[in-house]
Amino acid sequence: MTVLVVGGGIGGLATALGLARAGQRVTVLEAAPLFEEIGAGIQVGPNGFRMLDSLGVGAAVRGRAVHVDELRLRCGVSGRQIAGLPVNEGFQERFGTYAVVHRNDVLTPLLDACQNDERIDLRVSSGVEAYTQDADGVTAVLRSGDLVHGDALIGADGLRSAVRRQLVGDGDPQVSGHTTFRAVIPAQDVPLSLKENVVTLWAGPRYHVVWYVIAGGRYVNLVATADNDATDPMTGKPVEHAEVMKHFTPLCDDAARIMELADEWRAWVLCDRAPITDWQDSRVVLLGDAAHPVLQYAAQGACQALEDAVCLSSVFDPRDVGGSFARYVSLRSERTARVHHASRWMGREIYHPAGEAAEVRDAMFASWAVADLHDRLEWLYG
């Protein structure tokens, strides 16, 4: 049996690796000319690391990650601390590793493992436009016109998935109205007074700014997001510094000092889709952002794709492909919908509130001890 995996990002390669470890032959069809992740840093929670461990690459990713001590929420206007969640010691004992890492430092160990598995055929410049099914299996129709045949097909081709377009037919993703500006700064440029081994998030009225160190401490990942009512999709567009800064006022001194260090910005308009349960078309199924794209606010996009990959690999039965895929969807759809709603809620109520809503947020965090935060995170990380 050969399983076709459309998309060679974190979710696609994790799925290929999981299926191969379960004894299946896999062909990965990646549209780009090489396997790489677009973007810079991501946060990987304990649930993500457990999936990486089960795939045999957890140690490699941990070795490339920065293991922060705390997640810290501060007021974007005054700079005062609103809340802090230590993610060492007690957190690790209950949940496991929380770390920050460059996206490629997650992808590379997965890619290395796939390249070293003779059951996995990795193909680049192989973008998929459509698929067909018959009694003999599934055929991927490439943009080049070439055909690739397999016994099953998994669409892990991201937010604007061609597989989803055919399977679900629900049009373009939903534009959130939020624009994220990203930059990478040499860590040596950051003033010593601001250097801490934490993920710091400044939350202001209709904006937030987050930064943390990546790439073994060599760079700082800076992400500034504005609720600016953006209506047009944008993916990685270069933006002038002055254009970025106009969305972040008033802004406390520390956040402003960090943002002033960035000289190259790129912009993304954030999108997601409402949760659905029809991810499957017989021998074809969706995975990761192709199935359940979420906003960035819960830091769960990659983690949920990894959970999908491990779940699908564990239930896959070559004697009953359709039944396996149905089982996978039933196991994953409710949880991913909950993550979707939690991500939207966090953006609205934690990251971007203003006025009385911000006061309610502050009072809520003031009433919680660290143990309370742990209890509230049990469903996600436990």
Image: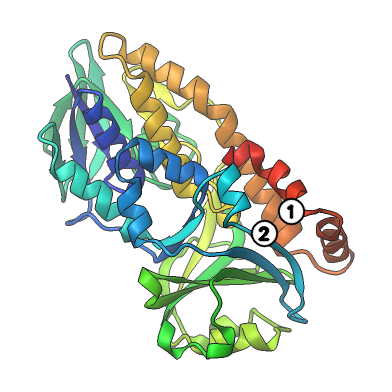
Q: Is residue 140 left or right of residue 302?
A: left
Quarter holding the N terminus?
A: top left
Q: Whole-percent x and y of residue 7?
A: 28, 43
Q: Give the x, y percent position of residue 289.
A: 44, 43
Residue at figure coordinates x 51%, y 20% from the top left: 330
Q: Residue at x 29, y 40 (%)?
A: 56
Q: Secondary structure at mark 2?
A: strand
**Residues tagged 2 and 1 counted as in contact (Cβ below 8 A):** yes
Q: Nearer the viewer, residue 266 or 96?
A: 96
Structural crowding at the residue carrying mark 2, measured as other residues with C-alpha within 10 Å and reported as few (<14), some (14–19) or many (≥20): some
Instruction: Name the residue nearer the viewer: 51 or 299.
Output: 51
Q: Residue at x 31, y 60 (%)?
A: 104
Mark 2–mark 1 Cα distance, whole angstroms, equals: 7 Å
Q: Quadrant of residue 144?
A: top left
Horizontally, residue 38 falls left or right of residue 46, namely left
The residue labelled by disc 2 is 85
Residue 205 shows up from this direction? yes
In the rendered structure, the answer to whether residue 308 lies left or right of residue 209 reads: left
Q: Position of residue 295 (x, y in %)?
A: 56, 52
Amino acid carrying mark 2 in the image: Leu
| Residue in view at x 68 percent, y 89 percent | 253
Residue 301 sits above or below residue 75 on the image: above
Relative to 281, does residue 273 appear above or below in the rendering? below
Q: Quadrant of residue 279?
A: top left
Q: Is residue 263 left or right of residue 71?
A: left
Looking at marks 2 and 1 on the same chain, the residue that comes earlier in the sequence is marked by 2
Instruction: Residue 102: give x, y in percent of width and height.
Output: 38, 63
Q: Quadrant of the C terminus?
A: top right
The residue where tag 1 is placed is: 370
Tell which of 191 and 69 is nearer to you.
Answer: 69
Q: Amino acid at mark 1?
A: Val
